[in-house]
């Protein structure tokens, strides 16, 4: 494919800017409220456990995991893993993140459809994210030599990349809903006050920006490849 200035200007630089801004906001907001305590004085792990117990979820394990902002819920073994700055910390940031992850456990327990969909997409996305770019590049190279042979390969590459795009889009309602559940439960359970919840909410909103940035960048990249291969014009019915 060679060096492509249009890709640099249209996709790479804007994508880096969007992702960089989202990452900066997460770190800045988490750090700001990392030093702010709560009246309940609960740790992140205690807050998540209370939130789950009040919802009747008793089969979810909560355990610490190494790293910073490496928090996640694993539906395969119903385990909520909280990073070191969250598990034992007693800050607004820690409680916000912990309760957000507990929100994913509640989604699992209630059969939230978008979480089920995302879980089914994981194995497909793991393969497609690794294979899509090599296949696309090979297809475009073949297109320049033998269009008839190259087009099926390009179509396969686009299909593989589309799976990753679908995953990033499906992730948005999953993350937004988990935060919405956390914001409501934190106050109802007395984990945070209304004033404290505003800070926790800012942490969660900043984190959501990272998923939004990933989805926007992946959609922009897909549109670029559709344009570059001529598929976008075909889809729009242009001659």
Image (tube, helix red, strand yellow):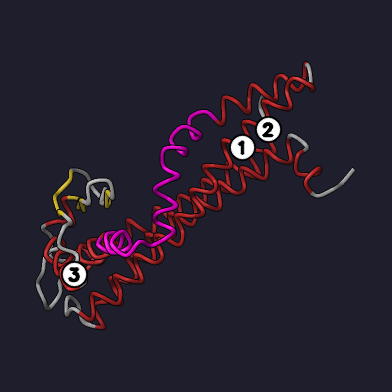
The residue to which callout 1 is attached is 159
Dot 1 crowding, Cα within 10 Å, few <14, some 14–19, many 20+: some
Comes first in the chain, label 3 or label 2: 3
Picture layout, residue 189 above or below residue 74: below
Q: CA gap, disc 2 to disc 1?
A: 6 Å
Report the magenta stretch's main SS.
helix
Rendered residue at 66%/27% (across/down): 3
Q: CA gap, disc 3 to disc 2?
A: 47 Å
Rendered residue at 30%/74% (across/down): 183
Please state which of residues 17 and 210 is positioned toward the viewer in this rendering: 210
From the top left corner, tell me how far across and down residue 34 is, in percent.
Answer: 21, 63
Q: Find residue 155 and report its image quarter.
A: top right
The residue to which callout 3 is attached is 56
Whether residue 179 is in magenta: the answer is no
Q: Find residue 209 and report its image quarter.
A: bottom left
211 on left or right of 188: right
Q: Kindly tell me whether residue 31 is visible in this rendering.
A: no
Picture layout, residue 230 above or below residue 131: below
Dot 3 crowding, Cα within 10 Å, few <14, some 14–19, many 20+: few
Residue lying farthest to the top in this orientation: 145
From the top left corner, tell me how far across and down residue 144 is, in percent.
Answer: 77, 20
Comes first in the chain, label 3 or label 1: 3
From the top left corner, tell me how far across and down residue 139 is, in percent.
Answer: 67, 24
Secondary structure at numbered mark 1: helix
Instruction: Determine contact: label 3, label 1, CB under 8 Å.
Output: no
Rendered residue at 27%/52% (across/down): 73
User: What are the residue bounds of the magenta stretch?
Assistant: 102-131
Instruction: Determine contact: label 2, label 1, CB under 8 Å.
Output: yes
């Amino acid at each position: 494919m060679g060096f492509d200035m249009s890709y640099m200007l249209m996709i790479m630089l804007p994508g880096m800017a969007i992702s960089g801004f989202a990452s900066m906001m997460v770190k800045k907001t988490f750090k700001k409220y990392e030093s702010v305590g709560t009246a309940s004085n609960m740790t992140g792990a205690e807050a998540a456990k209370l939130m789950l117990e009040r919802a009747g979820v008793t089969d979810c394990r909560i355990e610490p995991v190494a790293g910073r902002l490496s928090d996640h819920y694993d539906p395969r073994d119903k385990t909520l893993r909280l990073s070191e700055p969250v598990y034992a910390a007693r800050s607004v940031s820690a409680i916000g993140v912990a309760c957000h992850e507990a929100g994913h456990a509640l989604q699992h327990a209630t059969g939230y459809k978008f979480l089920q969909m995302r879980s089914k997409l994981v194995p497909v996305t793991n393969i497609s994210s690794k294979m899509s770019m090599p296949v696309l590049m090979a297809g475009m190279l073949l297109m320049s030599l033998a269009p008839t042979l190259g087009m099926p390969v390009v179509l396969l590459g686009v299909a593989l990349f589309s799976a990753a795009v679908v995953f990033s889009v499906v992730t948005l309602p999953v993350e937004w809903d988990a935060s919405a559940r956390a914001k409501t439960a934190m106050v109802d359970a007395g984990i945070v006050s209304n004033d404290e919840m505003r800070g926790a909410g800012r942490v969660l909103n900043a984190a959501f920006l990272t998923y939004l940035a990933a989805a926007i960048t992946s959609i922009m990249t897909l549109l670029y490849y559709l344009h570059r291969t001529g598929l976008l014009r075909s889809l729009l019915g242009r001659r």
